[in-house]
Amino acid sequence: MQIHISPSDGIPIYLQIISQVKRHIASGRLSPGDELPPIRALAEQLTVNPNTVARAYLELERAGVVTKRQGAGTYVAEKPSPLSRKEKVRVLSERADALLVEAGHLDIELDDVIDLLRERHGLFSPAAKP
């Protein structure tokens, strides 16, 4: 699993890790039951504090994306997220709000944002998986 962080982009590193793990799962690069790198190994690879990786893994576990097996590591969850539909919509609404605010700052029209989302969605469709 390759994760690339950008300390200068203004997004906290732990959120970048969370986002990329979710992206790997959505694209099929990580499957249910796959093991994530150990916290210390990933921290060393990214040259970040292990607490940063631990925080990302904890947030992923709270969201039901991964499960921890005592003494055995962290794995992609076998079951879908336990979040209710209402909670899922709330989480996505927050992210949609942030995207729309950013698009406004960049002077990008809503139709262009929708086109971009459709294009990006195509990258995660089953036909696009390796």
Image (tube, rainbow, N blue to C red):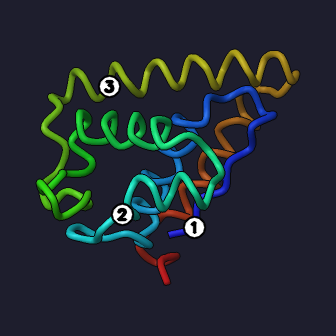
Residue 92, numbered label = none
Q: Nearer the viewer, mark 1 or mark 3?
A: 1
In the displayed structure, does residue 57 sit left or right of residue 130? left
For disc 2, the marked residue is: 36
Query: Nearer the N terminus, badge 3 or badge 2?
Result: 2
Asked if labels 2 and 3 touch by Cβ distance under 8 angstroms, the answer is no
Name the foreground residue: 129 vs 73: 73
Residue at position x 61%, y 19% in the image:
98
Residue 2, numbered label = 1
Label 3 to label 2: alpha-carbon separation = 27 Å
Label 1 to label 3: alpha-carbon separation = 29 Å
In the displayed structure, does residue 94 sit left or right of residue 46? left
**Residue 125, position as x, y percentages in the image:** 46, 66
**Residue 124, position as x, y percentages in the image:** 49, 63
Examine the rendered structure and indicate whether residue 63 appears above or below residue 22.
above
Q: Of helix, strand and loop, which one carries label 1?
A: loop
Q: Of helix, strand and loop, which one carries label 3?
A: helix
Q: Residues within 10 Å of mark 2 (few under 14, many from 20)?
A: some
Residue at position x 15%, y 59% in the image:
71
Identity of the amino acid at label 1?
Answer: Gln
Count of numbered labels shown in the rendering: 3
Label 2 to label 1: alpha-carbon separation = 10 Å
Identity of the amino acid at label 2?
Answer: Leu
Q: Residues within 10 Å of mark 1 (few under 14, many from 20)?
A: few
**Residue 42, position as x, y percentages in the image:** 50, 58
For disc 3, the marked residue is: 89
The single residue placed furthest to the bottom in the displayed view is 130
Q: Nearer the viewer, mark 3 or mark 2?
A: 2
In the displayed structure, does residue 76 sit left or right of residue 26? left
Query: Nearer the N terminus, badge 1 or badge 3?
Result: 1
Residue at position x 14%, y 61% in the image:
78
